[in-house]
Image (cartoon, grey):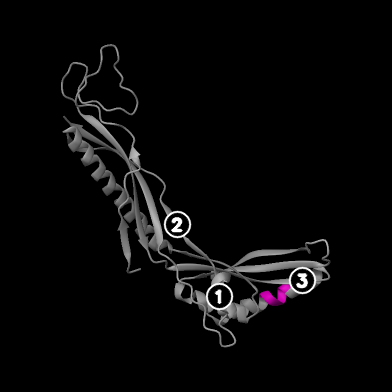
Amino acid sequence: MDRRRFLAASSVGLVAAVAGCTGSATEGDDDPEPGSTTGSDANGTDADGEITVSADGEVEAEPDQATVDVGVTATGESADAVTDELASGAERLRETFDDLGIPDENVEEGRYRVHPARGRETDGFEGSHSFDVTLANVDRVGEVIDAAIEAGADDVGRVRFTLQEETRSTLREDAIDAALENADAEAAHIADNREVEITGTAAVTTGDVQVHAVRTEASDDAAGGAGGAPPTEIDADPVSVTASVTVTYTFEA
């Protein structure tokens, strides 16, 4: 994960407008409106005011984990016949995963269905059995797809590119840092505009931190890799991590 870049994300908006530089609390109204800020108390003396800003931060990194959805399908005159064919196909796929050196814990059962064939003119039964294969090396995605197809897989679904847990943790902090930097810049601009000086931070709230995985349809990209065909290559865009913060700053007029 050599490439990482921060994206300059503009503030989502202001939670509260600055209103403390020109006014004072009116008599008989001790509490300001929710979300407003004040710069003087009821007696006209200077008091700390507040600026509250919401901002987003985003970082990107190359994916370091991928999950491939592959499986087999079957049709037959009876449910038992379909079940037997799916079992044989699934066993061939498991052997292929073993030959590729994929740990058992990285192969999870996906969909398994056997049902009457659809369509008015169609009799019998049909079914499918899929697996979700997780790879720590995203460069092996094409290799796994090609090997699965050669082993009889005829249901190649989505590939999900994402981040390993350790990488997620690091980028989560980076995304929060980026959001805080954007909030600081926004608050500084407001303070300059209102001709006040920020003196500190009164409160910080973090919102959702999300990892935005990249998904692609492997069936659209798979070349098969068999019979002399070129090996499948699937390139993924960078994975992004976003965070949001709300920061309340104190200021003096």
Q: Find the magenta span and give its range.
A: 86-90
Q: Please state which of residues 49 and 149 is positioned toward the viewer in this rendering.
A: 149
Report the residue marked by disc 2. 212
Earlier residue among tags 2 and 3: 3
Looking at the rendered image, the quarter that the C terminus falls into is: top left
Q: Please state which of residues 160 and 167 is positioned toward the viewer in this rendering.
A: 160
Q: Single out the mark in the foreground, 1 or 2.
A: 1
Q: In this view, does 52 lie above or below 22?
A: below
| Residue type, mark 3 in image | Thr
Q: Is mark 3 on a helix, strand or loop?
A: strand
Report the residue marked by disc 1. 222
The span from disc 1 to disc 2 (Cα, nearest Å) is 23 Å
Q: Residue furthest top?
A: 28
The structure residue drawn at horizontal position 82% and vertical position 61%, both measured from the top left corner, is 120
The structure residue drawn at horizontal position 32% and vertical position 63%, both measured from the top left corner, is 4
Report the residue marked by disc 3. 75
Specify whether residue 87 is painted magenta: yes
Please give left or right for residue 47 compared with residue 28 in the image.
left
Q: In which quarter of the image is residue 118?
A: bottom right
Q: Report the predominant secondary structure element of the magenta stretch.
A: helix
Residue 19 location (% of width, % of height): 25, 27
| Residue type, mark 2 in image | His
Q: Is residue 226 above or below residue 194?
A: below
Please give left or right for residue 158 compared with residue 240 in the image.
right
Specify whether residue 152 is painted magenta: no
| Residue type, mark 1 in image | Ala
Tell me whether circle 1 and circle 2 mark residues in contact (CB < 8 Å): no
The span from disc 2 to disc 3 (Cα, nearest Å) is 37 Å
Residue 81 location (% of width, % of height): 80, 73
Q: Single out the mark in the foreground, 1 or 3.
A: 1
Please give left or right for residue 64 compared with residue 51 in the image.
right
Earlier residue among tags 1 and 2: 2
